[in-house]
């Protein structure tokens, strides 16, 4: 698949439609290597890819439930089970994180997060080019200190997204994309 074709045809797959097989071995290595080519002011390479699969998905669900209890001590069983099941929606998750270099003289934290987001975009586009489906999801767990700490991140760092990945079952809708023209203007000063 040509690069422009991969970019223009990429669609987010609903997480629950993603099944085995997942990218592994050389496929996964190439998908993650695509993330390494992201634009990166200062060559800081702030992105970190955390692979979550198998039983680790259940553990991540437990971490989400622990975080919910810390946020809302009176959470009912249904809410806890709902948040606990989120990581089980697909067979593979890549948590894309930004390890922030504080007080950098030229690259503020927001640019480091943007670089990690660009890496995430490259990862999902590369996954699509290899025939896999992916979707970037976040929600409050991505901003929760307990979740960040459980993933080995410090307070200064960020979870940019959780990329849910697998082989799409083909049931997702094809989205029409608007023309860029409605989003583009020429600035003349």
Image: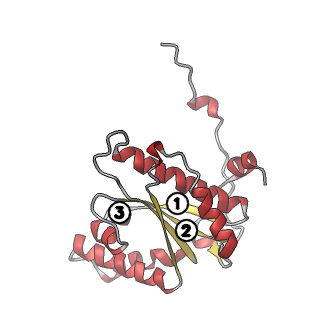
* Residue 136: % across, % down: 52, 60
Q: Is residue 66 above or below residue 1?
A: below
Front-most of 97 and 40? 40
Front-most of 105 and 80? 105
Please rate how many residues cluster around mark 3, counting C-alpha atoms within 10 Å: few if below 14, some from 14 to 19, many from 20.
Answer: few
Tag of residue 140: 3
Q: Among all residues in the image, which is located at the extreme right?
A: 1
* SS at mark 3 in the image: helix
* Residue 7: % across, % down: 68, 49
Residue located at (33% from left, 71% from top): 147
* SS at mark 2 in the image: strand
Please rate how many residues cluster around mark 2, counting C-alpha atoms within 10 Å: few if below 14, some from 14 to 19, many from 20.
Answer: many
Asked whether the beta carbons under mark 1 and mark 3 sit within 8 Å of each other, the answer is no
Front-most of 22 and 68? 22
Work out how far the residue at label 1 is from the one at label 3, CA to CA, in angstroms.
Answer: 14 Å
Residue located at (46% from left, 82% from top): 56
Q: Is residue 98 left or right of residue 22?
A: left
Q: How many marks?
A: 3
Please rate how many residues cluster around mark 1, counting C-alpha atoms within 10 Å: few if below 14, some from 14 to 19, many from 20.
Answer: many
Locate the N terminus and report the quarter of the image it occupies.
bottom right
Q: Is residue 12 visible?
A: no
* Residue 174: % across, % down: 69, 55
Tag of residue 164: 2
Mark before the other along the chain sequence, 3 or 2: 3
Work out how far the residue at label 3 is from the one at label 2, CA to CA, in angstroms.
Answer: 16 Å
* SS at mark 1 in the image: strand
Q: Which residue is mark 1?
A: 136
């Amino acid at each position: 698949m040509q690069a422009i074709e991969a970019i223009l045809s990429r669609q987010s797959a609903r997480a629950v439609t993603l099944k085995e097989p997942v990218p592994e071995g050389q496929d996964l290595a190439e998908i993650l290597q695509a993330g390494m080519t992201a634009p990166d002011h200062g060559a800081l390479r702030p992105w970190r890819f955390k692979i979550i699969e198998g039983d680790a998905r259940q553990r991540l669900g437990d971490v989400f439930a622990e975080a919910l209890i810390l946020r809302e001590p009176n959470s009912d069983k249904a809410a806890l089970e709902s948040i606990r099941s989120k990581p089980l929606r697909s067979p593979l998750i890549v948590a894309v994180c930004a390890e922030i270099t504080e007080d950098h003289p030229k690259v503020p934290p927001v640019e480091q997060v943007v670089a990690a987001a660009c890496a995430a975009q490259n990862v999902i586009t590369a996954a699509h080019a290899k025939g896999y489906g992916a979707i970037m999801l976040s929600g409050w767990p991505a901003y929760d200190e307990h979740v960040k700490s459980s993933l080995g991140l410090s307070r200064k760092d960020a979870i940019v997204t959780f990329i849910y990945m697998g082989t799409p079952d083909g049931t997702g809708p094809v989205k029409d994309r608007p023309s860029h023209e409605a989003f583009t203007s020429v600035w003349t000063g």
